[in-house]
Image (tube, rainbow, N blue to C red):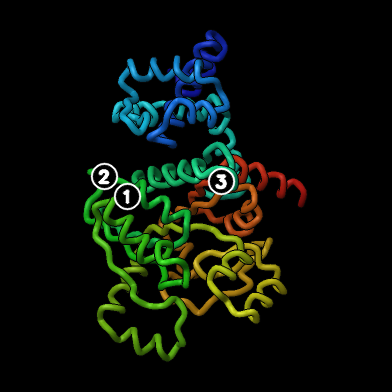
Amino acid sequence: MLTGSNWTSLLQRMAPEVVTIIENRYKVLRQIRLLQPVGRRVLAEVMQSTERIIRREVEFLREQQLIDSNRTGMFVTPDGENMIEAFHPFWKEVGGISLLETEAASRLSVRKVLIVPGDADESEWTKDDMARQAAGEMSRILTDNMVIAVAGGSSVARMAHYVQPTAEASNITLVPARGALGEEVDLESNTVTVRMARNLEATYRLLHLPDILEEETLRNIQRDPGISGVLDLIQQARVLVHGIGEAEEMSYRRGLSEDIVHILKEKNAVSEVFGYYFNDLGEMVYRMNTVGMQMEHVHTLDTILAIAGGKSKARAILSYIRNRENYVLVTDEAAVREMFALLESRE
């Protein structure tokens, strides 16, 4: 029996022109979704094509009722959305992304890697694509009565816009993974948790605490039933969603003291994950006295969904993600290829 991969191979050999037509139309449809609402001129510029070629493909997609338009521009219809999802595996196979994902998962020793084309350093649309992929992966792993811990940060905040309710799972509860880490309010875990829960049509609990507290203060606060209840829920989480930051950037964004910044530089900190800092070898070199999810608990979770991309962030991603077998990494092609280059330079 032929698999999807076999069919793709046969098509490429027997009718390569058909594969090219399908791939081009898929790219146009997918780009409209990323930019919508969008006009033909902007679409042609982004895709580095001519308006004549774009007009031809757009007319076909409109005839098939995969796109529509109004005064603001073209947008993808529900049928178009379904077509994008249906053709996504085919497109990854043709573009070599599937092989790259398999290789990345093997070389990084993680459960799964999902890769989108492009470089998040250069394109907001690549960031949106990563967010969509992460949201789709969350939908696939949801089960009844699940508790999900959600960290803050720009990547997870963007993902929150794309999560959708699912009939496959009920009684989902979202909790912030940590207290407030001193980021912009829109990027803090409480804010992201609320947005994600509402889009998922799930319930949520919030942790109204700063992330860093003195131990005696924390002991006193934990006696409060509301606070202790949320902390207990965080410990019950089976799924965690977080981003991966660059150590230096995150230390400044969080307003750490010059003494701590000096310590991080002295210990060659490269990456940061919800208050924990790691060097190139993946060793934890500094931890903030934080409230909520603890790194010691992470390896016991069923699934952790990490979202990070961009060539500039490859070193940070690599320093943290290796040998984490319960992780699904959502990233972009530029980051993966740079990680491969870094690995090869160290061999």
Label placed on residue 166: 2
Residue 315 in the image: x percent, y percent?
Answer: 66, 55
**Element type where label 1 sits in the image:** loop
Residue in view at x 50 percent, y 21 percent: 23
Which residue sits furthest front?
71
Q: CA distance from mark 3 to mark 2?
A: 28 Å
**Closer to the camera, 247 or 63?**
63
Residue 281 in the image: x percent, y percent?
Answer: 68, 62
Label placed on residue 120: 3
Q: Is residue 70 left or right of residue 309?
A: left
Q: Is residue 163 left or right of residue 316?
A: left
Note whether residue 74 is visible.
Answer: yes
Kind of residue sitting beneath label 1: Leu
Label placed on residue 258: none
Residues packed near mark 1 inside 10 Å, few (<14), some (14 to 19) or many (20 plus): some
Question: Who comes first in sequence, dot 1 or dot 2?
Answer: 1
Instruction: Name the residue beneath numbered marker 1.
Output: 142
